[in-house]
């Protein structure tokens, strides 16, 4: 890739106001038709379903959006569809994730041109990087795209845990506006919240499904739970309860959502972890009448009749059906 391909991007406006990034920001799923194309009408309905559920933002092109499986044209279609369907009601954050810095910069610039409000970026993957290179990676991306930049800590996919000291330095230098922590490391999460509590505009989000109440009690500004695709109103009630200081109500809602999260465990042998979780979300949304098909991106297997029946039972038990 030439240097011209990663020339600094024209400013999109100030990125100092990150206080609008808080609350429940679901990682939006990407529906497909039975024949495998992006299902635009279903994606529009998903967006409306989430907004009607009271969410505070939308995160597109993340793990729950099956971003590794999407072509650039499909990524563009997802972005433009959600941006148009949301119509400025909430901020739209987009994942700009590729193997190397130059590729991330190009992806980020393209998404910025499409009109997303903020970017979510992982550490480099495939390449064998150290923490110094990870820090420089985020600095380089930030130099070329004038949008709020959130670091996405997801070592299960990148095989690199973002170091606390690197994140703190990036936060204090204004390189990153926040972190979406999907590491599953609750101790690290708490230390991150403590290390950045002196930065009032810095945002820390948990990617957890079942301990969102605990993360919010520990200093999180919000959550990015995949299960919020299925029950956005439930997570919105949970967040509102914590904002009101009603932790007993928050726990009751979290307990119900934790039981609902059992939909990801109904799959039969031979289904990958990715297909089990995302397939459960899609199947639930199909049962709720939000999307037309639970089709997964190739080569993942879509869930079948027996799994769908089990998910129906859990939806009924949770009060969604």
Image: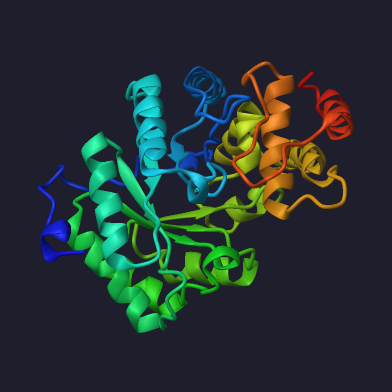
* Place of residue 102 in the rendered image (x, y in percent of width and height, measured from the top left): 26, 64
Determine the residue positioned at 12% across, 47% down: 11
Residue lying at the far front in this picture: please name it.
35
* Place of residue 76 in the rendered image (x, y in percent of width and height, measured from the top left): 35, 36
* Place of residue 99 in the rendered image (x, y in percent of width and height, measured from the top left): 40, 65
Determine the residue positioned at 74% across, 46% down: 276
Determine the residue positioned at 53% across, 34% down: 30
Front in this rendered view, residue 303 or 241: 303
Looking at the image, residue 113 lies above or below residue 146? above
Residue 241 can be seen in this image: no
Q: Please name the colour scheme applied to the rendered image.
A: rainbow
Determine the residue positioned at 25% across, 62% down: 141
Tell me if 126 is positioned left or right of 100 in this view.
right
Residue 150 can be seen in this image: yes
Quadrant in the picture for residue 242: top right
Looking at the image, residue 251 lies above or below residue 143? above
């Amino acid at each position: 890739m030439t240097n011209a391909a990663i020339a600094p991007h024209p400013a999109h406006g100030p990125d100092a106001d990150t206080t609008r990034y808080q609350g429940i920001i679901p990682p939006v799923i990407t529906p497909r038709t039975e024949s495998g194309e992006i299902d635009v009408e279903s994606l529009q309905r998903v967006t409306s379903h989430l907004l009607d559920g009271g969410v505070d933002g939308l995160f597109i092109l993340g793990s729950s959006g099956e971003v590794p499986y999407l072509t650039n044209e499909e990524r563009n279609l997802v972005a433009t569809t959600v941006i148009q369907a949301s119509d400025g009601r909430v901020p739209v954050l987009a994942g700009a994730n590729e193997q190397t810095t130059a590729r991330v910069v190009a992806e980020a610039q393209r998404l910025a041109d499409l009109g997303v409000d903020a970017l979510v970026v992982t550490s480099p993957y495939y390449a064998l990087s150290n923490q110094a290179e990870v820090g420089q990676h985020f600095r380089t991306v930030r130099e070329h795209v004038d949008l709020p930049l959130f670091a996405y800590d997801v070592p299960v996919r990148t095989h690199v845990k973002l170091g606390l000291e690197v994140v703190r330095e990036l936060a204090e230098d204004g390189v990153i506006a926040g972190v979406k922590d999907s590491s599953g490391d609750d101790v690290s999460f708490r230390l991150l919240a403590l290390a950045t509590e002196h930065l009032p505009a810095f945002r820390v989000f948990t990617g957890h499904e079942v301990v969102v109440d605990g993360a919010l009690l520990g200093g999180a500004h919000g959550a990015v739970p995949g299960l919020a695709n299925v029950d956005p109103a439930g997570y919105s009630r949970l967040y509102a309860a914590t904002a009101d200081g009603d932790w007993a109500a928050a726990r009751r809602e979290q307990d119900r959502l934790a039981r609902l999260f059992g939909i990801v465990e109904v799959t039969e042998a031979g289904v990958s972890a990715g297909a089990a979780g995302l397939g459960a979300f899609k199947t639930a949304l199909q049962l709720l009448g939000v999307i037309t098909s639970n089709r997964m991106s190739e080569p993942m297997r879509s869930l079948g009749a027996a799994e769908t029946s089990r998910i129906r039972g859990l939806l009924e038990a949770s009060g969604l059906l």
